[in-house]
Each structure stands twice: as C-alpha cells, then as structure tokens.
C-alpha cells in the first residue's frame, strides 16, 4: 500500500475517533462539570440519601434490605432492568418497605457505547419493568459509571438525573475491608447523596464486595442514627410523591 493510499484512511480514523470522543467523553465532562441537570445533593441538612446501584442481587439485596429494615432506614435503588425482571420479589419488598426507585439502564452498559436509540431503549425498558412491578413511574435516573453521551439530556427530560456527593469504591473488597467505614464516617452529612452497590457482578467489581460493604453500612447507620442524622429517600427529599 502506498503512502498516498494510507493517508485518507488515517484521516478517516482521526475523524471517527474525534466524533466518538465528542459523543462520549466530551459530553460526559461537559454535563458533569457544568452540572447540566445533574443533582449531587439533596436540600435537607444533616440528612443523607443512601442510594444503591446495580441490583437487585438475590443474596446481597436481601441482606441489605434486612439491614435497612433493622434500623428503620429508607433508601433509593437504581436498579438494572434485567435484574429487576429476574427478582421481582425483591422489587416488591423494596416497594412494600417504602424505598424509592431509579433507572440504571436495562443492562449495565455505558452510554458511551450505546447508540442514541440504544440509550432510549435502555431507559424505556427499565422504566417499563419498574412500573409493571411497582405500579409507579420512576422519577430518577443514574447512568452506569456516571457516563453520559450526546443524547443523554434529550432522552432523560422526564427524569431527575442524580449522581452522588460521595463515592467510596465499595465495589472492591480491599477498599471495604481497609477504608470504607472510616470514609463513611468522615463524609459530611449535609444533604449528602451516598452511592453504594448491592451487586458485585458488574465489570470491574469484586463479586463479594457487597458482603463487606454491608458490614460497614450496618455499623455506620447505627452510629449515624445515634448522632441524630436522618436518612431519606430521593422521592421524599424532593417531595415528588405524596406520602
Ligand atoms: Zn452501576
């Protein structure tokens, strides 16, 4: 192949790479840096919104619900649609026990690698599953890994996009064992939104990490309640539904 025939291919590759970066990484950085419809805090002082991503999981979500029930604490679950379909009894238990729901895609896929139509399908399918199981519309959206694409804001107009004020790397066993409880205790509690994970089955996570997260969470909630810190669902924080 001559140098003359390679140059147009290089040019095409550069253009395709550039379009991909604008569609994925650049869109994510702009949306998050400029806080375009992105919520990181709730409006209440001395109050925390506990949020859990990636479930439901047949073992860990059940154990998590037991911990929350033991302390009388309500939380918000950003569920993966296909997992919700697999474990409807866990979604039902969340609903009965007063927890809130959000969309976290039908499969745990990054928006960076979804076409515009693919993203819309992920949102619509998850919303449909949750509505079928709970009878209620889902009002919140959190994209997997916090990744947006060029069409994310267009297709999520009906949602409040909630990311987090505090993230703890609780998807790693080592982090949970060595740092999580201390990091939870060090986090400021004024309108905080904590992101934790009740499944370790996603790419990059340790399968058993939620087991260790739950131990830390149990101890943390007990201590926080003794300091009169409140826990609240996102529905209640934004007063979007009648109690
Ligand atoms: Zn996730």
Image (spheres, helix red, strand yellow):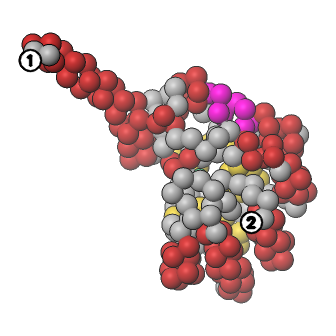
Residue closest to the far left: 3
Q: What residue is pinned by disc 1?
A: 3
Residue at position x 62%, y 64% in the image: 207
Residue at position x 51%, y 75% in the image: 175
Which range of residues does the magenta coloring cover? 120-127
- What is the x, y in percent for residue 151? 50, 28
Which of the two residues, 233 or 59, is positioned nearer the viewer here? 59
> Mark 1: few, some, or many residues within 10 Å (few <14, many ≥20)?
few
> Mark 2: few, some, or many residues within 10 Å (few <14, many ≥20)?
many
- What is the x, y in percent for residue 38? 52, 45
Number of numbered tags placed on the structure image: 2
Local secondary structure at mark 1? helix
Query: Which numbered disc covers residue 156?
Result: none
- What is the x, y in percent for residue 114? 52, 31
Residue 120 in view, yes or no: yes
Q: Main secondary structure of the magenta part?
A: helix
Q: What residue is pinned by disc 2?
A: 60
Give the left or right position of residue 12, taking residue 215 as reference: left
């Amino acid at each position: 192949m001559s140098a003359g025939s390679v140059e147009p291919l290089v040019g095409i590759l550069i253009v395709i790479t550039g379009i991909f970066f604008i569609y994925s990484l650049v869109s994510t950085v702009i949306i998050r840096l400029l806080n375009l419809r992105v919520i990181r805090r709730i409006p209440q002082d001395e109050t925390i919104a506990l949020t859990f991503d990636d479930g439901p999981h047949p073992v860990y979500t059940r154990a998590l619900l037991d911990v929350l029930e033991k302390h009388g604490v309500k939380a918000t679950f950003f569920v993966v649609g296909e997992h919700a379909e697999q474990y409807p009894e866990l979604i039902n238990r969340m609903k009965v026990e007063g927890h809130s729901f959000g969309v976290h895609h039908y499969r745990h896929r990054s928006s960076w690698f979804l076409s515009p139509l693919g993203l819309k399908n992920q949102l619509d399918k998850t919303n449909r599953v949750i509505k079928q199981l709970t009878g209620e519309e889902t009002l919140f959206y959190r994209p997997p890994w916090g990744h947006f694409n060029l069409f994310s804001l267009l297709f999520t107009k009906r949602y409040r996009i909630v990311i987090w004020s505090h993230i703890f790397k609780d998807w790693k066993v080592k982090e949970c064992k060595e740092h999580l409880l201390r990091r939870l205790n060090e986090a400021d509690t004024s309108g905080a939104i904590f992101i934790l994970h009740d499944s370790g089955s996603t790419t990059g996570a340790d399968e058993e990490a939620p087991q260790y997260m739950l131990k830390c969470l149990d101890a943390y909630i007990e201590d926080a309640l003794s300091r009169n810190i409140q826990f609240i669902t996102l529905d209640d924080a934004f007063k979007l539904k009648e109690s």
